[in-house]
Structures are given as structure tokens and as C-alpha cells.
Amino acid sequence: MIIVRDRYGRKIEYLRVSVTQNCNLKCIYCVPDRATAKLAGQEEVAAAGSVPYHSCAATLKPEEFEAIIRGMAELGIKKVRITGGEPLTRPDICEIVSRTAAIPGIADLSMTTNGVCLDKMADDLKRAGLRRLNISLDSLKKDRFEYITGGGRLNNVLDGIDRALEVGLEPIKINTVLIKGVNDGEVDDFINLTKDRPVEVRFIELMPIGKFGEDNRDNAVLNSHIIASHPELVLCEDNKSSLPAQYYSIKGYKGKIGFISSLSHKFCSSCNRIRLTCDGKIKPCLGNNGEVDIVEILRTQPQKLAKHIRDIIFNKPEGHNFDKKYTSTRNMNAIGG
Ligand code: SAM
């Protein structure tokens, strides 16, 4: 198998696959503003409050995801993360998981979910071949959780975390985006989650993606401030392999605390990932609007797929633009995080 490097010599081994733009939550910092929700070529889903579901003609089918991921695996992709929108809103999500899990070379298959449907789906996902889960959880207080997510029920997610641990989808990583004046008073509560549970809580700095993220740069909570105000945190040695997450532990705690400092740090020189959107575009960099269509070649000249992917990887941008004046053409629910 070839290991494809980009023009900066970076080994690209990690593919984040967004399988839908649709989501059953409307997190304030993620989903497009309702007023602009009608994006070209999309229809509003029946359920009130959901973001427009990507029209099925544009959204890839399970066999198309499989063909692309198989092509990527032959070029050195070893790790796949399924994300969205909310991946568990896709009725065929277990088929996508099992098709991906069966691809030779894919050594690690994980998912990022808001956990709302996890209680009911954890067993099926495990059976389909899913290994690990990242669960997004931005508040441990019912009312605040409902406010941040636009109507989500906290207990659904907590039940989902417990069920996932029961069926052995471990380790569970919890992703928390802190926003000044909204949930930044809950840092200690989240850290305490790691005391008696083998979970990893990761604080993700708010990125300037989407209107809320752009307008609230000053309300991002910088991870350095959390670390400085928690002297009990001890830096874990083996941080190299987990970049961009930096992990800390607390003496006597079962879990770990991670920090993903996309805003205040640039880990671009060690970036190893590319993204595939649900409408068949490869997005080589989260903080760059460049994307290349892959569906056309897949559907009309599949024999050219590998070379097309290699060229896209080679031309991956050197770094993100979060430290510049930057407006993302896609909201995060259309990228996948
Ligand atoms: N629906 C799934 C979920 O909630 O985890 C997967 C999709 S969601 C877009 C993936 C991750 O992106 C979530 O952890 C979410 O908190 C994060 N995210 C969304 N917008 C963000 C932003 N502007 N800055 C930082 N993280 C963001």
C-alpha cells in the first residue's frame, strides 16, 4: 500500500466522513441561523426544528461512501471517523458503519455523535463494527443543555453514555465547547466526570466557523486559562500520538482531561487528516474553504478515483486560516467538525 504524503511531507492517515448535514439538535454555535437555513438544493425536513436535510440526490449512498473510503484506504488512510450533522439520524448508519469496518486497512473506526439516539442504537453500532465514540456534551445542567442545543434532553445523552459503556464502546471521549457566559462555569463539573468514570473529557475551543463562531471569537474560552487555573492537572507524557488533543490527568482520577486548542494553537504541521462531506466533496482543511468534488469521478470514471484522491491530498493547504479574517463557506453541521 502506498502512504500518500502531501506536498509538505505530512502523512495523511485519518479521514473524517460526514454522512449527513441533518441534525436532531440545533446547537447555537453550529447550526446555520434559522433565517438562512434554506440552502440551495435542500429541503426542510418534516420535523420542526431540524436543519434542512441534504437532498437525497446529493447525499452519498452507503455503497458510495464504501467505494471512496476503500480508495482512500489503498492510499494509506487507516483511521475513519464518522460524523455529521448527526450521523445517528441516518436510517442506514449501521450499514455505513459495517461497510466501512469491513474495508481492509481501516484499523480504527469511530464516530462523533450528540448521543441523543445512542441509548437505543449503541448495541447495533457495536455489532456493525464501530469501535469508539466521541460524544458532544456542552452542559450537565438540564435547562442550559436545552438552551445550547435548541431543545435537546440531557438525560437522553447521559443514558446513551451509560449504554455505550455497557456495550463496550470504549474509551468514551466527551467533547465540550465552552462559551464565556454560557457554560464556562461548568469546567469543574466536567473535570469531575473523569473522577469515577474511565472517560476522557476534552475541551474544544470555539472555532470561527459559522456566524456564531465568527461573531463570538472573544467569547471562546482559551484552554490555557483552564490549565493555568487547575494546578492539579498533570501533563500526560504520551501526548504526541493524540495531537491536536493534549491530555492531562489528575491523581486518583479514572479518566483524563484533554484540550483541543484549535483557536490558540496551530497544529497544522502535524495534521494527518482530510474530510469527506456528505455531498461527496473532499475538504483537505477544516479552516480553508477549498474542496474538491469526488462524486463525478466516482460515478463516471471510477478507475481514475485513486489518482484524483492522491492529487487532492498532495495539494492539502499548509495551515488553517483561523488566525486570519476568515469566513467558512460551510457551517460545521455541513463539515462534520
Ligand atoms: N452531531 C455530532 C455531534 O454533535 O457531535 C457530530 C457533528 S458536530 C458538527 C461535531 C463536533 O463539532 C461537535 O463536538 C461540536 O461541538 C463541534 N463544533 C461545532 N461547531 C463548532 C465550532 N464553531 N467550534 C468548535 N467546535 C464546534
Image: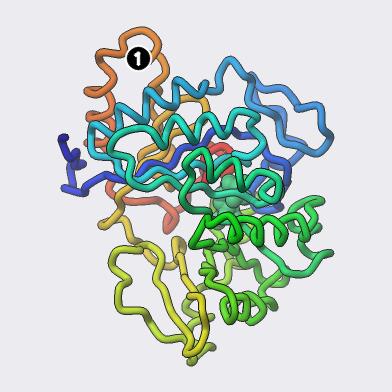
Per the image, the residue denoted by label 1 is: 297
Most foreground residue, 41 or 302: 302
User: Hey, which quadrant is residue 107 in on the image?
Assistant: top left
Whole-percent x, y for residue 205 in the image: 53, 64
- Residue at 67 percent across and 22 percent down: it is 42
Q: In the rendered picture of this protein, how many numbered marks are placed on residues? A: 1
Most foreground residue, 194 or 33: 194
Whole-percent x, y for residue 226 in the image: 53, 80
* Callout 1 secondary element: helix
Image position of 174 (left or right of 44): left
Task: Tell me which colouring the rendered structure shows.
Answer: rainbow
Mark 1 CB within 8 Å of ligand 1: no
- Residue at 70 percent across and 30 percent down: it is 52
Image position of 157 (left or right of 289): right
User: Hey, which quadrant is residue 285 in on the image?
Assistant: top left
Look at the image and tell me whether residue 210 can be seen: no
- Residue at 59 percent across and 39 percent down: it is 87
Q: Which amino acid does label 1 sit on?
A: Ile
Most foreground residue, 197 or 32: 197
Image quadrant for the N terminus? Answer: top left
